[in-house]
Image (tube, grey):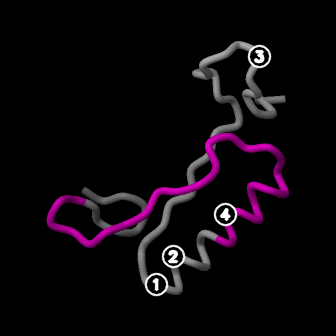
Amino acid sequence: MKLCDFEVGLDRPLFVIAGPCVIESRALAEDTAGALKAMAADIGIPFIYKSSFDKANRSSHQSYRGPGID
C-alpha cells in the first residue's frame, strides 16, 4: 500500500509512526516533530508524525484533552 511517499506492508521495510499522545502547544509539537524527523533520517527509516489536538478518549473526564480546535 502507498502511504505518503513510500510503500508499507508486511513485505516492506520498517517505518515509524510517532509523536506525543496529545499536543500541549504548537511550539512543542513542532520541536518534537523536528527531533523525531531528524532521528528517523539519521537511521534511514521513513517517519510519520502523529499527535492529537483533542484527545476525547481519556479515562477521566477531568484529564487534559489538549488545546482543542480553537
Query: How far is mark 1 from mark 3, CA to CA?
Result: 39 Å
Q: In the image, is residue 26 part of the stretch drawn in magenta?
A: yes
Q: What residue type is labelled 3?
A: Gln
Q: Name the residue under label 1.
A: 43
Dot 4: element = helix
User: Is the C-beta separation of discs 4 and 1 under 8 Å?
Assistant: no
Query: How far is mark 1 from mark 2, CA to CA?
Result: 5 Å
Query: In front here: 21 or 8?
Result: 21
Tag 4: Cα neighbours inside 10 Å, few (<14), some, or many (≥20)? many
Please tell me whether mark 1 or mark 3 is closer to you in this view: 3
Q: Which residue is drawn at 60% across and 54% down?
A: 19
Dot 2: element = helix
Magenta-tinted stretch: 9-35
| Residue 28 spot, x, y in % from top left | 80, 56
- Compared across the picture, whether 53 is left or right of 41 comes to right
Q: Mark 2 points at which residue?
A: 40
Q: Residue 62 carries which label?
A: 3
* Quadrant position of the C terminus in the picture: top right
Tag 1: Cα neighbours inside 10 Å, few (<14), some, or many (≥20)? few
Q: Which of marks 2 and 3 is nearer the N terminus?
A: 2
User: Is the C-beta separation of discs 1 and 3 under 8 Å?
Assistant: no
Q: Which mark is residue 66?
A: none
User: Is the C-beta separation of discs 1 and 2 under 8 Å?
Assistant: yes
Q: Which amino acid does label 2 sit on?
A: Ala
Q: Which mark is residue 33?
A: 4
- Compared across the picture, whether 53 is left or right of 26 comes to left
